[in-house]
């Protein structure tokens, strides 16, 4: 007879067959939680714990009408998945991208529960966004969209209820427009969004946080296994905030990044990627990564993204998007001598790819642990807002490093106690789950 976790997973697969991203996340999480569930099966099942854990508290869906620069009314779909608030107010980003749908936001919100739990900070899990694409839109069009989006969302969020942040397609510009509309409607000046500008409640080190945090945890993982970052060849996918600041920090640690990418293709620079060139292209000029080779003729550019994983390296940091490393790409990385993979994006490796890494003995830091730096500093921004204080960059960075090293220690200990030493996927899921489960049990059937 199937055990409790298997029965809940089977029910999810039958009910949500149309939500593949959510089922992928649920399968990984529930499968790795088996040792904990088995130990507490009767108690957890009597409390309906897993049934409550895998279903969001609520999903808010709404239309977002806005007027383009030609005066035509456009309509997008808006979402907020408030997944679990057992340990604190909902916390998770807003994503603006054509691919956004309920399945993707449920997967992200589900992962966010455990990610936020691992930080040790009092924040629950949530996620939201819209299928609106800010690319190619004028500032005025983005502003009108954001104001319309917040005109509905404002009634569902608050500094002690739900605190959204940025994600793909939501940067400083979008957060500013969203916050201005929230303040205009409510009359409240509170920490209801994170990723705000430094002059109006934002935190230093927020932009760098996810990339830096990824490197702090990857370094801790390597050191715990008798290895080091220094002297290693590194491949980083993506060229957004996470990739840029992961490249910066891993270089400071002594690694050499030789490749980066965007959604069109990748560059390879055997002498080491010149980050100042990438920053100029991406942060200032908003150009494609292929322009890099004009500034650095010794580098090469290749159309398509998956080929980046054929470049031999010892450390791989996927920082682009979900499922960018499939089984074939994972095998290429193993063949190329990869020793460690740190996930900077959300779920960038398929289940099959993860299995390839683990079977090959590759050190593997899953996203819910490795990319928790962003939400950690978002929570630190919430703390600064509540106290009406602003910490220095070095203070925030030191707290971030402590949090990320602490996360690694938690997942390492959980892996040793409940699974297999070095199985950081199981360790992350178990360590994150135990805290949430304890709170859910203590609070009763809510």
Image: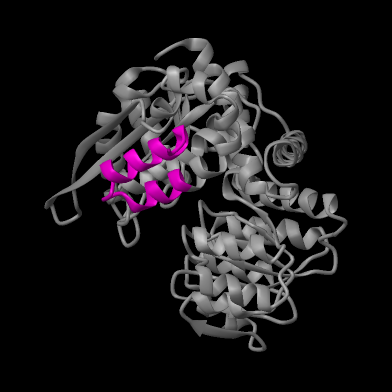
Give the quadrant of residue 52: top left
The quarter of the image holding the N terminus is: top left
Horizontal placement of 257 versus 383: left or right? right
Give the quadrant of residue 98: bottom left
Name the one closer to the observer, 303 or 385: 303
Q: Which residue is drawn at 67% across and 78% down?
A: 335
Horizontal placement of 412 versus 171: left or right? right
Horizontal placement of 316 versus 28: left or right? right
Can you say whether 136 is above or below 65 in the image?
A: below
Name the one closer to the observer, 1 or 55: 1
Q: Which residue sits furthest left?
A: 72
Q: Which percent across, then down, holds residue 439?
A: 54, 17
- Does the magenta segment cover residue 20? yes
Q: Residue at x 60, y 55 (%)?
A: 343
Q: Which residue is drawn at 81% across and 58% down?
A: 253
Q: Count the marks: how many?
A: 0
Whether residue 196 is visible? no
Whether residue 273 is visible? yes
Magenta-highlighted stretch: main secondary structure? helix
Q: Which residue sits furthest front?
A: 1
> Which region of the structure is painted magenta?
1-27
Q: Which percent across, then down, holds residue 397?
A: 74, 39
Q: Residue at x 71, y 70 (%)?
A: 338
Q: Which percent across, then down, holds residue 15?
A: 26, 41
The quarter of the image holding the C terminus is: top left
Q: Which percent across, then down, holds residue 330?
A: 58, 70
Can you say whether 210 is above or below 440 in the image?
A: below
């Amino acid at each position: 007879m199937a055990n409790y976790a298997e029965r809940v997973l089977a029910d999810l697969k039958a009910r949500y067959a149309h939500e593949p991203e959510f089922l992928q996340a649920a399968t990984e999480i529930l499968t790795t939680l088996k040792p904990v569930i088995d130990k507490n099966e009767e108690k957890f099942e009597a409390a309906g714990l897993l049934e409550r854990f895998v279903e969001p508290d609520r999903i808010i869906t709404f239309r977002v009408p806005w007027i383009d620069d030609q005066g035509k009314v456009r309509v997008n779909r808006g979402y907020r998945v408030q997944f679990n608030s057992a340990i604190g107010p909902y916390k998770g980003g807003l994503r603006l991208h054509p691919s956004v749908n309920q399945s993707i936001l449920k997967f992200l919100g589900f992962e966010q529960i455990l990610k936020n739990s691992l930080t040790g900070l009092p924040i629950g899990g949530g996620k939201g966004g819209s299928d609106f694409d800010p690319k190619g839109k004028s500032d005025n069009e983005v502003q009108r969209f954001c104001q319309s989006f917040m005109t509905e969302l404002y009634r569902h969020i608050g500094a002690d209820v739900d605190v959204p942040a940025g994600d793909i397609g939501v940067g400083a510009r979008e957060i500013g427009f969203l916050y201005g509309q929230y303040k205009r409607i409510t009359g409240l000046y509170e920490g209801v969004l994170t990723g705000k500008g430094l002059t109006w409640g934002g935190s230093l080190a927020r932009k760098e946080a996810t990339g830096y945090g990824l490197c702090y945890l990857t370094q801790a993982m390597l050191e715990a296994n008798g290895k080091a970052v220094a002297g290693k060849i590194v491949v980083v996918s993506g060229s957004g905030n996470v990739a840029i600041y992961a490249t910066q920090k891993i270089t400071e640690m002594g690694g050499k990044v030789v490749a980066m990418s965007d959604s069109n293709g990748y560059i390879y620079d055997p002498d080491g990627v010149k980050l100042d060139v990438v920053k100029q292209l991406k942060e200032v000029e908003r150009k494609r990564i292929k322009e890099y080779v004009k500034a650095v003729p010794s580098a090469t550019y290749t159309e398509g993204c998956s080929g980046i994983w054929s470049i031999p390296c010892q450390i791989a940091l996927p920082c682009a998007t979900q499922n960018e490393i499939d089984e074939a790409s994972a095998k290429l990385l193993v063949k190329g001598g990869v020793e460690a993979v740190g996930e900077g994006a959300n779920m960038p490796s398929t289940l099959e790819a993860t299995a390839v890494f683990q079977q090959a003995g590759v050190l593997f830091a899953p996203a819910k642990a490795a990319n928790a730096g962003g939400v950690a500093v978002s929570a630190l921004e919430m703390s600064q807002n509540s106290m009406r204080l602003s910490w220095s960059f070095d203070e925030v960075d030191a707290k971030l490093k402590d949090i990320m090293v602490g996360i690694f220690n938690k997942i390492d200990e959980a892996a040793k106690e409940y699974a297999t030493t070095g199985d950081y996927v199981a360790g992350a899921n178990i360590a994150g789950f135990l805290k949430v489960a304890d709170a859910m049990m203590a609070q009763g059937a809510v």
